[in-house]
Amino acid sequence: MRNQPSLGRRASALSVAIVVLALTAASCGSSTKETAGTAEAPTATAAAGDISTQEATTDTEPAAEPDVSTQEATTDTEPAAEPDVSTQEAAADTEPAAEPVVVGVISSYTGPFGIYGAPMELAMNLRLNAAGAAAGNIPVETVFEDDGTDPATAVQKATKLIEEDGASIVVCCVNAGSTFAVAPILAEMGIPQIVPIANPLGLHENPNGFVAAPSVNWDAERLGTYAAETLGYSTAVVMGMDMAYGQALANSFTAGFTGAGGEIVDQILTPFGTQDFGSFFVGVPDADMVFGGYAGADAIAFINQYEQFGLKDRAPLLGHGPLITELLLQIEGPAAIGTTVGFYYTSSLDNPENQAFKDALAAANPELPPSHFTAGSWATGSILLQAIENAGAGADGPALRDAIAAVEVDTPWGPAHFDADSGYIFGPTYVYTAVQDGDALRHEPLAIIN
């Protein structure tokens, strides 16, 4: 990543690991257009003809004189049948190839969430290409843009995708700030918006907005209730990023925890992009547990420094899924062991669609672990394919919006459909912890909150 603050010696190594993982995850460009492949051009030999065949032809015996009896017999045959008019009419009625539907995708290839863009692009392309880059007989083209984890840049890219690239649907975004910055613009233009991963509540204010996951509020509040009622914690310190995502997590966990009888001793929100948590950790008061609402580069720094400053020995760490997502888990290393989260997805889920997703990802890049980021992109591809096919060729605006709203698809976390009131997809919250398994870390399921 570029222009990131130093983490110190240990965290610098982690930053290098992020870059390596992002580079190996998949090849991508900040603005690329993907289309279905075309047939290969004929070889020079096929185009020009096989010379040896031509020479052999000239060496053959001259053709025999025609058999007169055969000619006479030919004149006695029935005249050729009249062409089948119905066949001609059917051919005339064949519809021309449908115009492609352009899907604009805004993701983060740089900035604090820059590690996610390339893997998410790969996963979406894998799902679309599995269907031949077509929804039924309607070609689907994708144009990918980088928002740099910056809402203002996301707005610029959304405008470009619609006005220059002709996007009929926009998939956006990884960063919640970008998601909400782009939403009113798309609403005004009548362009449907699909968010591929969990985001805070509020997108329902855009009638064209859909989130292919539960709200972050949903899982965080349930985890708060679980922490108080099931795990028996009485007091908690809540920490998170001071931006839309972190604020929603902090408030929702607090609501669930206090609603179940727990007490929040302190709430500490840190600037988005923080890489040195020392000044914040020294002031953390004693409590039964700490909740961490972090993702991306912030999550890696938070996890490692939580152990370095001795907090891991003082209080168990709970959090939202991205805190220990598989895409970060091996980078975080042993410091993540024992961290417990509540979330809608883990790669350990056992269902056919999750297996199909993981198999496709492993075949494309064996070094890239499945995560909710890539699972969400895969699911978004399924949503796009079904919605575009159901809307039909030439569909735009309201027709596409209605087709998306009616989608029912299998996702890596189970069967899913959009909630009619909010536009989010709701489901179980899975509680799991990070454990060591040989040389690697993995998720260990603990409970399901239905």
Image: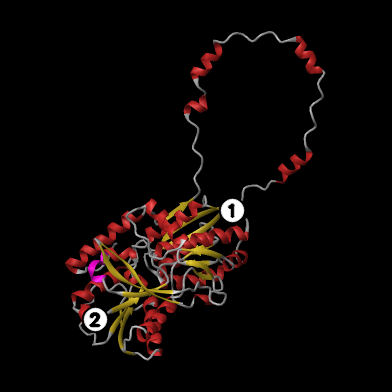
**Cβ atoms at labels 1 and 2 below 8 Å apart:** no
Which segment is the magenta one?
Answer: 331-336
Using the numbered discs, state the Cα–Cα distance from disc 1 to disc 2 in whole angstroms.
54 Å
The residue to which callout 2 is attached is 280
**Mark 2 crowd level (few <14, some 14–19, many ≥20, 10 Å Cα):** few
Give above or below for 98 relative to 447: above
Q: Which of the labelled discs sits on residue 303, or is there none? A: none
**Mark 1 crowd level (few <14, some 14–19, many ≥20, 10 Å Cα):** some
The residue to which callout 1 is attached is 136
Q: Residue furthest left?
A: 9
Name the residue: 24% across, 69% down.
5
Amino acid type assigned to the residue bearing label 1 in the image = Gly
Q: Quadrant of residue 301?
A: bottom left
Name the residue: 37% across, 86% down.
229
Viewer-closest of 233 and 239: 233
Asked whether the viewer can see residue 301, the reply is no
Q: Does the magenta portion include 340? A: no
Residue 17, x across and y down, in percent: 25, 60
Residue 279, x across and y down, in percent: 21, 80
**Secondary structure mainly formed by the magenta segment:** helix
Residue 177, x across and y down, in percent: 41, 73
Give above or below for 172 relative to 127: below
Pick the quarter of the image with the N terminus: bottom left
Labels in figure, total: 2
Give the mark toward the camera: 1 or 2: 1
Give above or below for 136 relative to 208: above
Q: Is residue 351 left or right of residue 140?
A: left
Name the residue: 43% across, 53% down.
32
SS state under label 1:
loop
Q: Earlier in the sequence, mark 1 or mark 2?
A: 1
Residue 305, x across and y down, in percent: 22, 74
SS state under label 2:
helix
